[in-house]
Amino acid sequence: MSEIKTAGPNTNLLLLGVNHTTAPVAVRERLAIPAARLADATRTLAHQPGVREALILSTCNRVELLTVYESSSEPSPITLRFLEDYLNVGVADIQPHVYQYRELEAIRHLFRVASSLDSMVIGEAQILGQVKQSWSVAREVGAIKSTESFSSTLDPLLQRAFSVAKRVRSETSIGSSSVSIASVAAELARKIFGSLSGKTVLIVGAGKMSDLTARHLIQQGANTLLVSNRTQSRAEAIVDSLRNPSITTGVLPFEILHDHAHRADVIITSTGAAATDPGAAQIFTTASARALLRQRRNRPVFFIDIAVPRDVESAVNEVEGCFVYDIDDLQQVASVNQASRTREAEAAESIVSSEAARYAGRLAQAPATEAIKQLLQNAEAVRQSELARIAARLAAQPLSPEQQAAVDALTQSLTSKLLHAQLAALRESGTGINPASPAQFTGQPGKKNRIP
Amino acid sequence: MSLLWLRVAVLLYGVAALAVLPAALYNQPRWRHVAFPAALAGVFFHFVALTEALSAAHHALPVDTHETLSLLGLLLAAAFVLLALSYRTISFGIFLLPIAVLLTLVPAFHPGHETILYIHSGWLFLHIGLLLTAYASLFLSLIASLLYLVQERRLKRKLTTSNRSWIPPLESLDQIALNALLFGFPCMTLGLLIGSVIALESIGPTFFADPKVLLSFAMWIAYSLMIFIRRHSGLRGRRAVYLSSFVFLVVLAVWAANQLSVVHRFKAP
């Protein structure tokens, strides 16, 4: 009988890394691997002794190395040495910030990261794309084998992580509400205008927040940007900084602001004029808002008043068709959304934990199942070959169909009895990853094992 | 057989009307995958039932008030399907689908036996169908205007915290309200014209002295005025709701006037 191989991956999974909660930015930036070097770094890590598969995830908030090792290797020193050699960073400098997860905990952490439960802003959508990008790079450089080759551990694991992230998105509202001022403003604009495609945004004044809000609105489809500022050169500078080929931009002289304000669907004000000149009137009053609305033939207009003191009279909100949100209103919506995300995150954690336990359990069974399959195949091959040999020897006096059936049954029964002990042993041995024990899942989410 | 399809349609409308509640009101997007296909299948079976009934009616189709209302139910359910496809909103189902169920329930389980004279005439069927389409459009426009008002108040009071608000954006609601009116207007005009020609042929000029008929023309004038005002002044919000409600009341009065009319009744004279 030929040697029986455990065809399934003899998994030894390690996830080692730093993130925004364990390492200050000074450490993270030393460990960050730029996108241009990601392929080379992944390839180099995959070629380290004992490493079977590797993936590197490097974003501004985390650097994580996910590796599958031969069972005989001790993985963490190898991975740390890779960081030291490749990035020229002293192990002693980074060791206090590094966490590591093995086996089931590594699976669970990966699922949490892909589902954006470990992100700085919980529920943000970019991380899934970043994990996919890392996976794609690792596959391209051969650091992750394809699932079809059957020897891959990371490929099916990553694909599972993507579907878990999708499940979290569809079954919870974790990513459905905005938590930053700029995105809340863009979300409100969508509630008024639906698609922002073809809409005009007017910035009155200057400021980082108004720029950021305008950027969000442009990302959502707004395609005309007007800027009005008391200082013409400042307005031109803002236009330059926000200009992109897909939008039309223009500077509106401050003196004729009210003559042209009706062209804008969204008006972002951030002059804070009253701060420098306490006697200055607010830029948009009820009367000017009514006039503006008349010119727009009652089409709604959305004022985002980021200025302190405010640029838009609060009574403008009472004018039919005018919607005024000041910085406090936006902040309040963002806070409520943040609280809602936190609640949703609890439901998401439970999905991730159960998915990780299920995956780890299945992985633990996989090698044994494959070994059983191969053992049975080999035994059947031997049985068939012996039957063929005996049939050839008895060619002169062939067996009757009844006799053939009896011999067939006898050999099958013998094979089963001979293999029984081996099969039982294989079924009991859960080689590879230990399936989840409930206690392992009751810990705090995100609890990390620091390297001593 | 048409009765069986109609009952299947009622059942499907019922499923859709229930499924749309968690989908729209309780942020359970998975129910959307039940509500929309059920409504679509309901519309299909309702259409099959209607076509079978009409093709079987070579001489006289048993049509009474309830069955005419069932056609209105079909139009409302079809409006829900079209809105879900065009505007990706199922919110209108909260209002349209239960009404579709109610309008279809009686003819499906207690079919009438009254007969409209001349129903064999395709023109009369067209007259009924076009006017019902105009009523359905007006009803849709009224709902869209009401939802506009609710959404406007939520935005003004800063109550919009969830991204998955069940009410569509203001601009979509405004478009739905106006487009529904614009679609309904030619239907009403053509429906009234066809009705007038049939009446002239069958009853004569006395038809036009009937209160129901006079009210119908008043309804047409109100309808066209409303479109004019909405288009040319950009009327939205509270005043648009008042205007739509007024015209809707006129339509209800026209409908109720069947009971008073001598010449325009569902029952054969």
Image (spheres, rainbow, N blue to C red):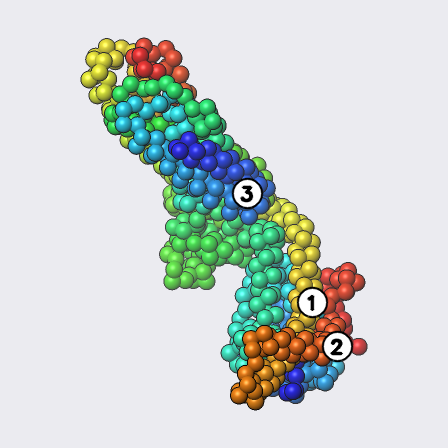
Is A444 rendered above or below residue A260?
Answer: below
Which of the chains bears the disc numbered 2?
A
Mark 3, secondary structure of its residue = helix
In the picture, measured across the screen, residue A230 lies left or right of residue A419, that is: left
Mark 2, secondary structure of its residue = helix
Mark 1, secondary structure of its residue = helix
Between B265 and A302, the residue placed more toward the observer is B265
Residue carrying label 2: A421
Image location (x, y in percent) of residue B85: 41, 45
Between A99 and A306, the residue placed more toward the observer is A99
Residue plotted at (66% across, 70% down): A363
Name the amino acid, label 2: Ala
Name the amino acid, label 3: Ala
Residue carrying label 3: B23
Q: Quadrant of the C terminus of chain B?
A: top left
Residue carrying label 1: A361
Q: CA distance from mark 3 to mark 1?
A: 34 Å
Between B21 and A420, the residue placed more toward the observer is A420
Which of the chains bears the disc numbered 3?
B
Between A17 and A238, the residue placed more toward the observer is A17
Label 2 neighbour load within 10 Å: few <14, some 14-19, many 20+: few
Residue plotted at (43% across, 26% down): B107
Image location (x, y in percent) of residue A204: 47, 50
